[in-house]
């Protein structure tokens, strides 16, 4: 009978050690879960801020490129013409658009 009691005592001690290990694991998991929940709670606000900042960056990028005009196919040689009047002549000749006067160029938005 003493052998059975000692076996039960050893088994009980082993079970108590396992339970203590499980408690420690559960405590660690609870701490990790708490950290994750805190981070997840902040995500909607960070997403809204990110969308706002993305909109601002897109707007600034569009504004920075708004006044940039690209011309393709402009000859790279100097034909001796006046450099100030070259863009107007080039637009009128090659793009078949109307000739802009200097006042129209200055007052256009």
Image (tube, helix red, strand yellow):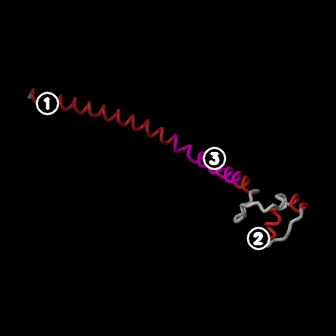
Dot placed on the residue nearer the N-terminal end, 2 or 3? 3
Nearer to us of marks 2 and 1 is 2
Q: Residue at 84% across / 61% down in the picture?
A: 85
Q: Read off the residue under disc 2.
A: 94
Q: In the rendered image of this protein, does residue 30 appear above or below residue 93?
A: above
- 59 falls in the magenta region: yes
The answer to whether any part of residue 35 appears in the image is: yes
Give the distance between the C-alpha atoms of the residues marked 2 and 3, in whole angstroms.
47 Å
Instruction: Say which quarter of the image contains residue 101.
Output: bottom right
Nearer to us of marks 2 and 3 is 2
Dot placed on the residue nearer the N-terminal end, 2 or 1? 1
Q: In this orientation, which residue lies closer to the viewer: 3 or 75?
A: 75
Residue 25, labelled with which disc? none
The answer to whether any part of residue 109 appears in the image is: no
Q: In this orientation, which residue lies closer to the viewer: 7 or 2?
A: 7
Horizontally, is 97 left or right of 12 in the view? right
Give the distance between the C-alpha atoms of the residues marked 1 and 3, in whole angstroms.
63 Å
Q: Position of residue 8 (x, y in %)?
A: 16, 31
Tell me if label 1 and label 3 are in contact, CB under 8 Å: no
Q: Secondary structure at mark 1?
A: helix
Q: Position of residue 54 (x, y in %)?
A: 64, 51
Give the distance between the C-alpha atoms of the residues marked 2 and 1, in whole angstroms.
102 Å
Q: Read off the residue under disc 3.
A: 49
- Within-10-Å neighbours for mark 2: few <14, some 14–19, many 20+: few
Horizontally, is 96 left or right of 103 in the view? left
Indicate the quadrant containing the N terminus: top left, top right, bottom left or bottom right. top left
Task: Give the prevailing secondary structure in the magenta stretch.
Answer: helix
Q: Secondary structure at mark 2?
A: helix
Instruction: Say which quarter of the image contains residue 109.
Output: bottom right
Q: Read off the residue under disc 1.
A: 7
Residue farthest bottom in this picture: 96
- Residue bounds of the magenta highlight: 38-61
């Amino acid at each position: 009978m003493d052998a059975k009691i000692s076996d039960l005592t050893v088994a009980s001690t082993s079970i108590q050690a396992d339970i203590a290990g499980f408690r420690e694991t559960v405590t660690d998991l609870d701490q990790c879960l708490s950290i994750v929940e805190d981070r997840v709670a902040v995500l909607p606000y960070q997403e809204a801020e990110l969308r706002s900042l993305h909109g601002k960056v897109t707007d600034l990028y569009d504004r920075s490129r708004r006044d940039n005009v690209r011309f393709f196919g402009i000859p790279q040689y100097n034909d001796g013409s006046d450099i100030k009047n070259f863009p107007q002549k080039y637009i009128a000749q090659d793009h078949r658009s109307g000739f802009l006067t200097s006042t129209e160029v200055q007052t256009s938005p």
